[in-house]
Amino acid sequence: MTSPGELERTLRENLRGEIDFGAAARALTTMDASNYRRVPVGVVAPRDADDVAAALTVCAEAGVPVLPRGGGTSIAGQATGVGVVLDLTRHMNTLVSVDPEARTAVVHPGLVLDRLRDAVRPYGLTFGPDPSTHSRCTLGGMIGNNACGAHSVAWGTTADNVTELAVTTYGGTSHRIGTGWAGAPDGLRELITGHLGPLRTGMPPGFSRRISGYGGLDALLPEHGVQVARAFCGSEGTLGVVTEAVVRLVETPRAPVLAVLGYADESAAAEAAAGLLPHGPLTVEGMAQDLVGDTAARLPRGGAWLFVEMPDEGAARALLRAADAVDRALVTDPAEQRALWRIREDAAGTATRMPDGGMAWPGWEDCAVPPARLGAYLREFRALLAAHGLRGSPYGHFGEGCVHVRIDFDLVSAPGIARFRTFSEELADLVVAHGGSLSGEHGDGQARAELLPKMYGPDLIRLFGAYKDVWDPAGGMNPGTLVRPARLDENLRFAVLPATPFAGEIARCVGVAKCRTTDPGGASVMCPSYRVTGEERHSTRGRARLLHEMLAGEIVTDGWRSTEVAEALDLCLACKGCRSDCPVGVDMATYKAEFLHHHWAGRIRPLSHYTLGGLPDWLRLIARLRAAGAVNALARRVPVPGLDRERGGRLPELAREPFTRWWARQPDPAKGASGPDRASGSGGAVTLWPDTFTQYLNPSAGRAATQVLRAAGLSVQVPTAGRVCCGLTYVSTGRLDRARTVLRRTLDTLGEPAGPVVVLEPSCAAALRADLPALLPDDPRAARLAGAVRTFAETLEEYAPAWRPPHLDRKVVGQTHCHQHAVLGDGPDRRLRERAGLTGELSGGCCGLAGNFGFEPGHHEVSVACAEEQLLPALRAAPPDALIQADGFSCRTQIAQLGGARARHLAELLAEGL
């Protein structure tokens, strides 16, 4: 076999696309969304079909396997491989053409499904199959897995919606296949005509979700029209590489309506699903209480639910009348429909988290049985789980008998892995006993291919092998998948990780890749740097994969000193968006802090870690010296060391009078005295936190909050400034030991707070609520303080519910702080704005400044691009008299520097109206 170095050189000589055999590229493609991990030799991003052919020719001559890869969201391990990975998303991602009259589109394999749907929406058309990963899965990956999605009840699988495929095989030969034998590889026709009997009588009884193995092989029968392209779908990259596809489009219902039906339990819902099919539903999706959780309050009564989408309101009302459900609801509002569908779309991630905080894993994600058998199958499935001491929350496409579930397997210890194997074998037997398919839409991969003989028997398994050999006689296409497969308990991704808490956190990323969407996504924040660069290493998943490989030590070999990980994390804004937007709660900001803590241990850090990371210390010293004016004057002339020159190399101006100095000068109405720790007002006591930004940079927010809180009848106390700090800047620069010291001093100074602790700066409130107890888990004071933290709006809602704010009657624009979105929530803020007559929505996403990020050298371009996603366009579109709100100091600074406008804290807006 050719050496990796020689292979890389030959590929570079023959291709125009990118060839990367470096550690980072390989580390990013060791895993998909499954439990498996295999290390490739390199990654190739072909520019076109000619590049694909050249790569397949070079690799075949070198005897190196090839794996085509799209979004990498496969959950059975079929998108992992040991040879060359073809990344078809970087260049081969275009929509070639659309024919609205014929209702067809020509697509390249790396095109993301949602981009196709967006392009054909103006014609009233869509692509029928719609997996929950529609915002990041590719058409090539859907063809490889024969993906289905929620609407397959109406529009079928991907195989039902593909008419032609351009395929290049291992060795570089090109084929154009559709219906009929034209374009098929030599020997295929003879193979099929020689095995008509087994294909006609040996295949399991057909139903819509028989996806396992080469389950579409009977499409080659003459009575089925010799559909070569259809039979190719679902081959999981084992036959060749799709370079172009002609797909069918379907008409989009103009006003679909969602009927939500509540049932006593899961079995009742499952048994009812098949009976709804004669009503012509577009979807029949099922889920039970253990998956829905607290969201059940928004649903009709019941312990399990069917989400049934109907083409119009009349059809939906007829369904409601006919359905034998405990309770029912009709949802016509598109926004409410989208909110309910998000519960279902996030299920692949939310089902990974058990109620007690444990994790559940894929592996048996999408078995399917004939819909009429679903209720009985689910009862036996639950019993099998219990017999093995396992837990999982089934959900999925009940109308087609396809059930998704993630199970809390122990995939680390030898006994746990043995139980995983035994359970897998018994579950395969159960599925087959019900006439089902081991895979109902996501493919078999390594998770189930070993068990295919249980479903198909030895004769068909031999035929499958012969079918692959016709297409791929050298066996170079994704070997070990479907035919002559690897064992289901080999190559588990957890085996390479050390037994540490940090490794356990990194393993949380299951690869569903919600972070890879390129749409701003309204209120969603994750992942701003990926949306700017489009590079996998800048997605939350990509960074988690690099950290995984750093801990494994096989590809990334320099541990915590890894330059690959450092470079990927450099553009992480630490926005914490992934903490809330990632379905499994990956918290990359925390992981980045931990990495920086180890990466720079015992070394001189970047200058920005001392200037920006030590900002509270510097600002406290300047205030003590009463040197704010002199520092401001100097900063206007001399750039601050360690700050980005494109921002002028300077911080915002320091306030001449810190907030607590102003506070100390105020007379105490109750005592006729003044001092830093006295209260005023007639209501309950609150502690107003003098965060660094309010204290030294924007004390007007603190003064305004004091005024509003007193107007609401609350007594205000302010702790000694300079002795209390949330430690945010030390955490964000990975100076965790210093952060712990600062937080212990804070707890010593604060004592037991009187009532809620009102924190005006969202990033500081998030640090106290989340980072404080995580950094000092053994100090009970940390948990108490975290529990006492309230935002400004939360305080007024909880402790002054009868207070009526001034009615401002103005439109408001601005930015919701990303840490507020991710950690604190903004429901009370929305309600307070509504009560104050402030109309409109604040921008979602991230402002792009993100604390120290936007001030650090090399980050300016990304920082501006993040602001251009939502914030700056919203400001430009706002009416001239609109108020601009941004509770985060970073957001206000970004608005001032890039938008040329003054934003204010909500407290300031209310104070002006008093």
Image (cartoon, rainbow, N blue to C red):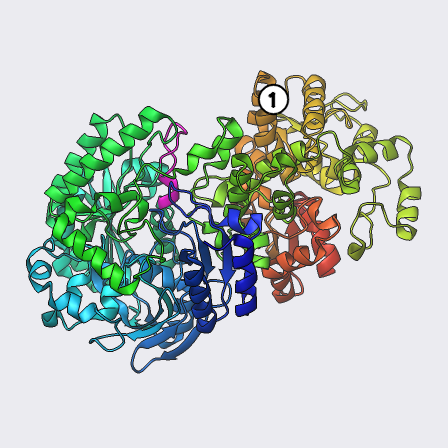
| Magenta stretch encompasses residue 574 | no
Q: Secondary structure at mark 1?
A: loop
| Magenta stretch encompasses residue 359 | yes
Evaluate whether residue 811 shows in this view: yes
Q: Percent position (x, y) of residue 911?
A: 69, 44
| Image quadrant in which the C terminus is located | top right
In the displayed structure, does residue 306 sit left or right of residue 693?
A: left
Q: Residue at point 74% right, 39% down? A: 693
Q: Percent position (x, y) of residue 775?
A: 61, 25
Which residue is labeled 1 in the image? 776
Say few, some or many: other residues with alpha carbon within 10 Å of mark 1 (under 14 / 14 to 19 / 20 or more). some
Residue closest to the eye, 13 or 622: 13
In the displayed structure, does residue 837 sit left or right of residue 415?
A: right
Q: Is residue 231 above or below residue 551?
A: below
Determine which quarter of the picture holds residue 426.
top left
Residue bounds of the magenta highlight: 348-360
**Magenta segment, prevailing SS (helix, strand or loop):** loop
